[in-house]
Amino acid sequence: MILSDEAIISFLQISSVPYEENIHLSAKTWIKRGGIGRFFIMPKDMEQMKTVVKYFLQNKTPFHVVGATSNIYIQNTCDLHIVISTLNVDQEEEFDDYVICGCGVNVTGLSRKMVKNGYVGYEGLVGLPGTIGGAIVNNSSAFGYSVCQMSKEIYCIDENGNDLVLSSDDLKLTAHSSAIKTKENRCIVVGAKLLKKKGSVEDLKSKSEKYQKQRASLQHEIAMTLGSCFYKLSKSTLLTILLTVRFLTRKTIKIFCSKKVQEKRLERTLFYTLSGYHDLARYVDIIQPNCFIWRDEKADDVFFRQYLPFMKKYYKAEDLEIEIISDDKI
Ligand SMILES: Cc1cc2nc3c(=O)[nH]c(=O)nc-3n(C[C@H](O)[C@H](O)[C@H](O)COP(=O)(O)OP(=O)(O)OC[C@H]3O[C@@H](n4cnc5c(N)ncnc54)[C@H](O)[C@@H]3O)c2cc1C
């Protein structure tokens, strides 16, 4: 039997777990989307995270665990009953050869520190948004680096509410996914033991700077995007035709436009108008078609009505990398 709201409140208060009731999820999520969250629970550390997760699992009451929500699109029409945010489970405990991180530790912050202190394996992860927990579940990676490959032990709670220690091999990792993401393994990550291996500070700093520059050149807008929307893109014949037309018009536009910015804007408008999806010019990243920008209120409609069909037609994009939550079904 699912727990009553009164029982949940009583448990949270007795256990001194910080929580809010009936909040607008749009105030808490990366792309400012989502309906009402009946309970928004923010455990303070790994121990409290374990207590909270075990309580709901043992009482067979469904819940959502979220990190920085940099890969989740909760629709505005979607109200969620119980959301557990890991953002305050952000403690780090340093040892000689490893660091124990709570699931809410910020990946960029940790990686920056590792680079500064001369530990290898994190140089490509500066600039990757989100938490350690989210990065493990999503097997997030950049420039050949990933949190999973640095994880020696992953501390989890299994679906029956028992403590479990996993290795990255147990996660059956694939590109940007894991057995936890596919729900083959219904674990909640509470923390991880990450390796510290000495390298040259100068070398790591220069690599990290190079990757950050590369990231900046690929990503123009960080706020209000979820990174890549699809796992795999490939060019359709239609896209090749469209790109050829764009190339020819670019040359023409250059003759009439003196300013580079105007040139780009005009080129984009023309490109999406020719494709039959003219609204997209405002909502798709200028370089990365795989990156949608939830810029304003109209974006939700544009995403479903124009972006998804456009990506399917021109880029043969089928499988979403981002997670869309449209109702409170776990
Ligand atoms: C600008 C931008 C750039 C990006 N660049 C990259 C990139 O280079 N490479 C890349 O791989 N990704 C990238 N992403 C995607 C995203 O940042 C990563 O997937 C990130 O690791 C998600 O972390 P999060 O804390 O935001 O997770 P969330 O989005 O909050 O959650 C992701 C999933 O993990 C689950 N989850 C979160 N924490 C836990 C936990 N503790 N236990 C169990 N389940 C949990 C959630 O339920 C959800 O299913 C980018 C996103 C943005 C916005």
Image (spheres, rainbow, N blue to C red):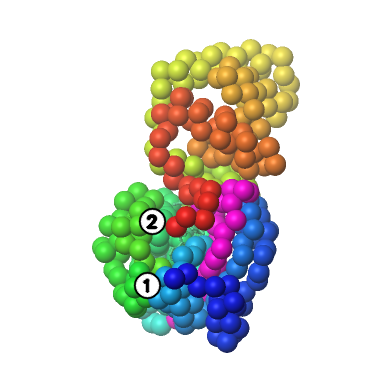
As measured in the structure, the alpha-carbon distance from the residue carrying label 1 to the one carrying label 2 is 14 Å
Q: Are marks 1 and 2 in contact (CB under 8 Å)?
A: no
Q: Which mark is residue 295?
A: none
Against 275, is 88 above or below? below
- The x, y position of residue 185, in whole percent, is 32, 62
Which corner quadrant of the image does residue 220 belong to? Answer: top right
Q: Secondary structure at mark 1?
A: strand
Image quadrant containing the N terminus:
bottom left
Residue range (magenta):
67-94
Please name the residue shown 41% across and 82% down the image: 95
Q: Amino acid at mark 1?
A: Cys
| Neighbour tally class for label 1: few under 14, some 14-19, many 20 plus, Cα within 10 Å | many
Judge: label 2 CB < 8 Å from ligand 1. Answer: yes
Q: Which residue is mark 1?
A: 156
- The x, y position of residue 108, in whole percent, is 52, 62
Q: Which residue is mark 2?
A: 181
Residue 327 in sight in this render: yes
Q: Is residue 328 magenta?
A: no
- The x, y position of residue 122, in whole percent, is 43, 62
Against 327, is 85 above or below? below
- The x, y position of residue 320, in whole percent, is 44, 42
On screen, residue 189 versus residue 30, left or right, reads left
Q: Nearer the viewer, residue 191 or 245?
A: 191
Q: Nearer the viewer, residue 195 or 192?
A: 192
Against 96, is 140 above or below? above
Image quadrant containing the C terminus:
bottom left
Q: Nearer the viewer, residue 33 or 152?
A: 33
Q: Is residue 93 magenta?
A: yes
The answer to which of marks 1 and 2 sits earlier in the sequence is: 1
Which corner quadrant of the image does residue 37 belong to? Answer: bottom right
